[in-house]
Image: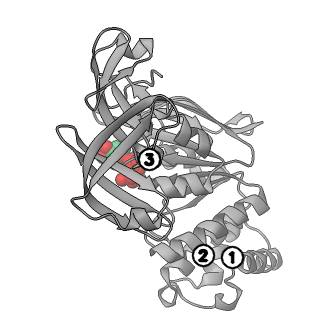
Amino acid sequence: MSQVCLINIHKSYGRHAALKGINLDIGSGAFFTLLGPSGCGKTTLLRAIAGFHAQDAGDIVVGGESISSLSANKRQVGMVFQDYAVFPHLNVFDNVAFGLVQQKVTAADIRQRVAAILQTVQLEQLAQRMPHQLSGGQQQRVGLARALVTRPKVLLMDEPLSNLDAKLREELRRDIRQLQQEFGITTIYVTHDQEEALSISDQVCVMFDGVVQQVGSPWLIYKDPQNRFVASFVGSNNFMQVGKLEQPQGLLLGQPLALPPLVWAQAGCVAAARPEKIVVNGPLSGPGIRVYGTLRQAMFTGRELQLSVELAGHGMLEALTAPSEAMVALKAGDDVVLGLHASDLQYFAPGATGARLA
Ligand SMILES: Nc1ncnc2c1ncn2[C@@H]1O[C@H](COP(=O)(O)OP(=O)(O)OP(=O)(O)O)[C@@H](O)[C@H]1O
Ligand SMILES: [Mg+2]
């Protein structure tokens, strides 16, 4: 059952169209992430759902009822911001209690609900501290507690982890996911970090330029990008210009290769191959191409080996392999052979958001 329906949402700032007809269906209890580059409209969409500004057109439906005409404090939507947004003059307890006081909840209930939520976010020892006595991670836990304590129907989070260092970010990411599952609360989460989006979400919505590019599970978005933008924004990818010989033969990195008919029929298509799909110094197990290149950089990260290889006349390719003794011994300047299986190639129509063709 869908909990949040966004129906044809439009929003402009002056002449700049920030949202160009957003249609989304978000299931009850889902962790749903809006992923996209800076300026694509993520915050604009969250603010419209929260009721901080009105959309120009379209409707927002929560639990089967339109909330478009309700003011922000009537929407039963909780929001966590990027820049903590805790009240500096209130201690932790009073920060968390704020929404309940406004809702005129009794003092005894407030004490009990705030104590319970502070325990959930592991801040029970810090209830009397002032915000300036808290770390960034602790302040963000206050923000989370404050949003959850009012028992909202929907939880909105706008890049809540982007001001934290890498280790804390990962820790709080796990905590947020766990809390979300415990509470079963429908969550719309915003990030421009694709790794974060893939690791935390049930569903990912990739946005670009005020338009939804694709919605799907993290696995689907990664494995089956529906256009070139999604293929390049989510994960790493190598893009290669496709040339043509006699039908159905095409030319990729200077090598002949049979092309799918749709790709052969259009000029200017590109092929894409994920770095981990590239075979380094090894045989192919099926149809494909092999090309010679020169290793320019090798980076060993423990778990894997990243290789940047220059192909004469065809630019650079990035490959990712399991580190073996022989692979790690490779040095810049060494000759390498790269192999691409035809079955690992994806093809896209021309343009930044060119559609997937095969
Ligand atoms: N108050 C405003 N007045 C005019 N233009 C705005 C306003 N707020 C946002 N915009 C523009 O609308 C577009 C979408 O902005 P938005 O803040 O929604 O992007 P975002 O996806 O949240 O980006 P970021 O990842 O940087 O936070 C941008 O081009 C931005 O410059
Ligand atoms: Mg934003």
* Mark 1–mark 3 distance (CA, rounded to whole Å): 50 Å
Q: Residues within 10 Å of mark 2 (few under 14, many from 20)?
A: many
| Residue tagged 1 | 121
Amino acid marked by disc 3: Gly
Marks 1,2: beta carbons within 8 A? yes
Looking at the image, which residue is at 66% across and 70% down?
A: 175
Which residue is the site of mark 3? 282
Mark 3 nearby-residue class (10 Å; few <14, some 14–19, many ≥20): few
Query: Upstream in the sequence, badge 2 or badge 3?
Result: 2
Numbered badge on residue 316: none
Could you tell whether 224 is left or right of 232 in the image?
right
Closer to the chain start, of discs 1 and 3, is 1
- Residue situated furthest left in the rendering: 313
Sequence order check, earlier mark of 1 and 2: 1
Residue 70 visible in the shown view:
no
- How far apart are the two marked residues, 1 and 2, measured between alpha carbons? 8 Å
Marks 1,3: beta carbons within 8 A = no
Q: Secondary structure at mark 3?
A: loop
Percent position (x, y) of residue 52?
50, 50
Image coordinates of residue 21 in percent, x first then y, are: 47, 28
* Quadrant of residue 211 within the rendered picture: top left
Amino acid type at circle 1 is: Val
Q: Residue 253 vs residue 64: left or right?
A: left
Q: Which residue is mark 2?
A: 142
Circles 2, 3 touching at the beta carbon (< 8 Å): no
- The Cα atoms of the two marked residues, 2 and 3, are separated by 53 Å
